Image (cartoon, rainbow, N blue to C red):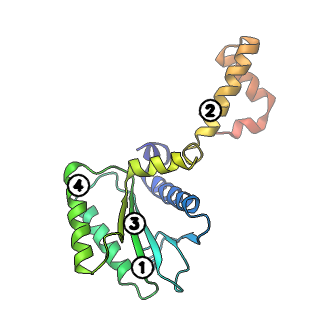
């Protein structure tokens, strides 16, 4: 929900996709990892890993669902079918990335849905994956991306500068802010953390 507060829903949706692209590029540095521009002809792919059209690819579907209900379940099924039935590429694996963690009932739905899709389409058990909010956060942290994608480095660095200036000169926060603004017009354009 941090993304929604900062970027509103539509902006957060795009940022979430970009985070997923960045993460999968880091996870598979020797592979061809590409994001796909949103369009009606995206063939059910947000991110793919591999040489599309040349070999089976790993499809990543990013679903930014602040809430989860029947409509979202339907969208997942539609995206999965679209990707699986594409004549543009062949699937090796399909991964759903979502911003939240599932509740008990939603987890039960996911496990049942995955089993039905796998049996119905004769897929192996390791063809369909879920990366929920906690999994994605853990992967971002493990791969040293968390601070970068959430712009935490900038906040930490600014806090360090303010702290150091305050220790050396015993300025109030207002005096430090005023001094910083006066010292550089470029700093006025930096996000206010």
Q: CA distance from mark 4 to mark 3?
A: 17 Å
Residue labelled with disc 2: 156
Residue labelled with disc 4: 106
Q: Earlier in the sequence, mark 4 or mark 3?
A: 3
- Residue at the top extreme, as displayed: 170
Question: Which image quadrant is residue 185 in?
Answer: top right
| Helix, strand or loop status at disc 1 | strand
Q: CA distance from mark 2 to mark 3?
A: 33 Å
Q: Residue at x 42, y 77 (%)?
A: 92
Q: Nearer the viewer, residue 168 or 91?
A: 91
Can you tell which of label 1 and label 4 is closer to the viewer? Answer: 1
Q: CA distance from mark 2 to mark 4?
A: 36 Å
Instruction: Note whether 42 is above or below 137 in the view shown.
Output: below
Residue labelled with disc 1: 91
Q: Earlier in the sequence, mark 2 or mark 3?
A: 3
Q: How many marks?
A: 4
Q: Earlier in the sequence, mark 1 or mark 4?
A: 1
């Amino acid at each position: 929900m941090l993304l929604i507060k900062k970027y509103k829903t539509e902006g957060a949706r795009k940022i979430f996709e970009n985070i997923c692209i960045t993460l999968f590029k880091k996870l598979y540095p020797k592979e061809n990892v590409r994001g796909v521009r949103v369009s009606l002809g995206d063939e059910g792919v947000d991110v793919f890993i591999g040489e599309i059209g040349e070999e089976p690819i790993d499809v990543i579907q990013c679903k930014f669902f602040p809430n989860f209900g029947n409509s979202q379940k339907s969208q997942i099924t539609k995206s999965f079918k679209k990707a699986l039935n594409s004549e543009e590429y062949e699937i090796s694996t399909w991964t759903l990335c979502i911003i939240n963690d599932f509740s008990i009932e939603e987890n039960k739905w996911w496990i049942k849905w995955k089993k039905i899709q796998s049996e119905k389409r004769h897929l192996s058990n390791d063809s369909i994956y879920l990366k929920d909010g906690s999994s994605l956060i853990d992967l971002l942290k493990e791969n040293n991306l968390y601070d970068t994608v959430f712009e935490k480095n900038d906040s930490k660095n600014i806090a360090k500068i303010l702290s150091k200036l305050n220790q050396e000169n015993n300025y109030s926060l207002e005096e430090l802010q005023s001094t910083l603004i006066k010292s550089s017009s470029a700093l006025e354009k930096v996000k206010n953390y």
